[in-house]
Image: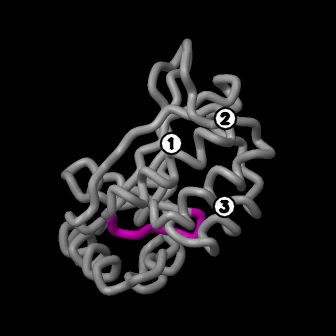
Amino acid sequence: MTGQERRDKILLLLNNSENELSANFIAKKLNVSRQVIVGDIALLRATGHSILAKPKGYILDNINSDYKKYQIIVKHSFEETLTELEILVKNNIIIYDVTINHPSYGLLKGELNIKTNDDITQFIKSKPNLLSSLTDGIHVHTLLYKDQEDLDKALKELNLKGFIYND
């Protein structure tokens, strides 16, 4: 099997799965090493395929075009992370990513794709070192939403908690 054939099969596996697929799982399916799969994923990303790396593996970023994007600057402590995420998810908001502006390295981005309470639990259990810990809690989230009322309600709640950053 050529490299291109293998990458086509990786895309097919990801397309046919609703859950994350680990590099080890894909490697076993295609009879290659995990390192080969990691390299193939990097090549697929470089050629424009939107593949998310999540704690349990890779998944295609098939966010429906019905969603609108909104970026928000927030500031909170590590301990307040759970509250922030719960406010957003209960209002039907997807936390797509997080970005910080690091003084030395510039923009650093992490993919989140948090949609459900289970996603929140998994994220919190992983005891992440938050990117925002590098910027005194200040960070930007890209949010995805369908209904403006849901977004407005979430923003109001975040503001009441003092999470929305105003310089």
Helix, strand or loop under label 2? loop
| Label 1: element kind | strand
Disc 3 packing (10 Å; few <14; some 14–19; many ≥20): some
Q: Over which residues does the magenta segment extend?
A: 55-61
Query: Which of pointers 3 and 1 lies earlier in the amino acid sequence?
Result: 1
Labels 2 and 1 touching (C-beta < 8 A): no
Q: Which residue is mark 3?
A: 123
Could you tell me which residue is drawn at 38 percent across and 84 percent down? 17
| Side of 93 where 55 appears, left or right | right
The quarter of the picture where the N terminus appears is bottom left
Instruction: Kindly identify which residue carries mark 1.
Output: 98
Element class at badge 3: helix
Amino acid on which disc 2 is placed = Gly
Tell me where residue 32 appears, x and y as whole percent: 43, 75
Q: Whole-Å distance between the Cαs marked 2 and 3?
A: 22 Å
Residue at coordinates 52% horizontally, 73% vertically from top-left?
22
- Residue 166, placed above or below residue 35: above
